[in-house]
Image (cartoon, grey):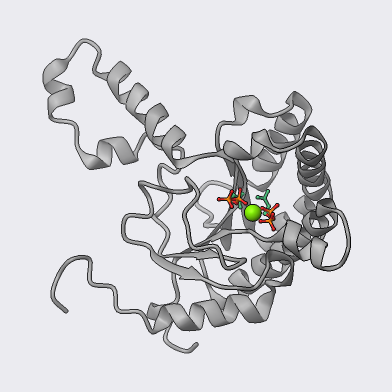
């Protein structure tokens, strides 16, 4: 893609289909999850190569806590391992790593390693990261809107007129994604065509792309073709163009 203006600033991916990928191979679901980590690495590289500035990945939803304990702990274990294994390389590439979501529900040890990784990859003052890598963990869109609404109500607890005048930007600034531009492109793998309670507010004008590829098979080539597809979209934002 030569036209830089057609490269999305923020690409977000609902990484789905690990279980089916494993089943197709006669393996347990966890086998798919561990191969999914390879796809994360590939997409980070592809994002850096193509000039995408923000890559966010839906790794675990609030609803996913309802899966069997063994699967939940495997997923959390993979997260822990990935942080330990990948952070030095991410830092070296100039990638800023962050985890967003209802992190109070996470195991304390995992949360500590997340906070350490965030501090380690935080850019020095005045330095812009090559890529912001955001992992949504224990995240749901409705939860995010609710926690922002509660903060807004608290902020204006003794100022009803202030609350009356609160703007869309005021609420946006209280979502966990405050300061992150809304996704230009949201990709969902595995053929499912739904949002599954992901970025509800932030997806207001995102381009949606549903691909049949299962997440463990979604690598650089698939990432690049998604960007190609995006470059053909005509974003009108309700206007005439
Ligand atoms: C995505 O793959 C990973 C998570 C949601 C944590 P799935 O585990 O949902 O795989 P399928 O959809 O059952 O194939
Ligand atoms: C969505 O996938 C959540 C993540 C990819 C983290 P799910 O597999 O949980 O979604 P549903 O249940 O098919 O909607
Ligand atoms: Mg799924």
Question: Where in the image, quadrant-wise, is ligand 3 located?
Answer: bottom right
> Who is closer to the viewer here, 158 or 75?
75
Which residue is at 58% across, 47% downward?
124
Most distant residue in the bottom direction: 2
Q: In this view, does 27 lie to the left or right of 148?
A: right
Q: Give above or below for 47 relative to 72.
A: below
Q: How many marks?
A: 0
Query: Quadrant where the C terminus lies?
Result: bottom left
Question: Which quarter of the figure has residue 165?
Answer: top left
Q: Residue at x 81, y 62 (%)?
A: 23
Drawn side of residue 115 relative to residue 37, left or right: left
Horizontally, residue 85 falls left or right of residue 50, namely right
Tell me where residue 116 appears, x and y as whole percent.
Answer: 72, 36
Residue 145 seen in this snapshot = yes
**Position of residue 26 measured from the top left corner of the image (x, y, whole percent):** 88, 63
Compared with 33, 136 (above or below) is above
- Given residues 136 and 197, the one toward you in this image is 197
Image point (58%, 80%), residue name: 224
Q: Position of residue 19 (x, y in %)?
A: 75, 56
Q: Residue furthest right?
A: 27
- As drawn, the residue found furthest toward the top would be 158
Q: Is residue 27 above or below residue 137?
A: below
Depth check, front residue: 33 or 169: 33
Percent coordinates x, y for residue 45 in the rendering: 68, 70
């Amino acid at each position: 893609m030569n036209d830089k203006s057609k490269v999305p600033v923020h690409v977000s991916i609902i990484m789905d289909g690990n279980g089916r990928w494993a089943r197709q191979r006669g393996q347990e679901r966890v086998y798919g999850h561990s191969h999914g980590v390879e796809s994360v690495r590939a997409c980070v590289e592809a994002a850096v190569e193509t000039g995408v500035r923000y890559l966010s990945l839906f790794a675990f939803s609030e609803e996913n806590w309802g899966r069997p304990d063994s699967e939940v702990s495997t997923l959390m274990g993979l997260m822990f391992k990935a942080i330990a294994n990948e952070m030095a390389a991410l830092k070296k590439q100039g990638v800023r790593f962050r985890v967003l979501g209802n992190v109070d529900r996470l195991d304390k040890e995992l949360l500590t390693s997340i906070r350490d990784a965030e501090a380690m990859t935080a850019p020095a003052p005045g330095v812009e990261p090559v890529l912001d890598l955001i992992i949504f963990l224990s995240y749901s869109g409705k939860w995010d809107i609710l926690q922002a609404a509660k903060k807004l109500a608290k902020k204006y607890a003794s100022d009803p007129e202030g609350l009356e005048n609160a703007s869309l930007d005021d609420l946006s600034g209280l979502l966990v994604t405050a300061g992150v531009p809304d996704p230009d492109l949201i990709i969902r793998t595995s053929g499912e065509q739904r949002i599954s309670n992901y970025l509800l507010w932030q997806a207001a004008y995102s381009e949606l792309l549903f691909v049949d590829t299962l997440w463990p098979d979604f690598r650089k080539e698939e990432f690049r073709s998604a960007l190609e597809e995006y470059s053909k979209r005509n974003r009108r934002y309700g206007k005439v163009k």
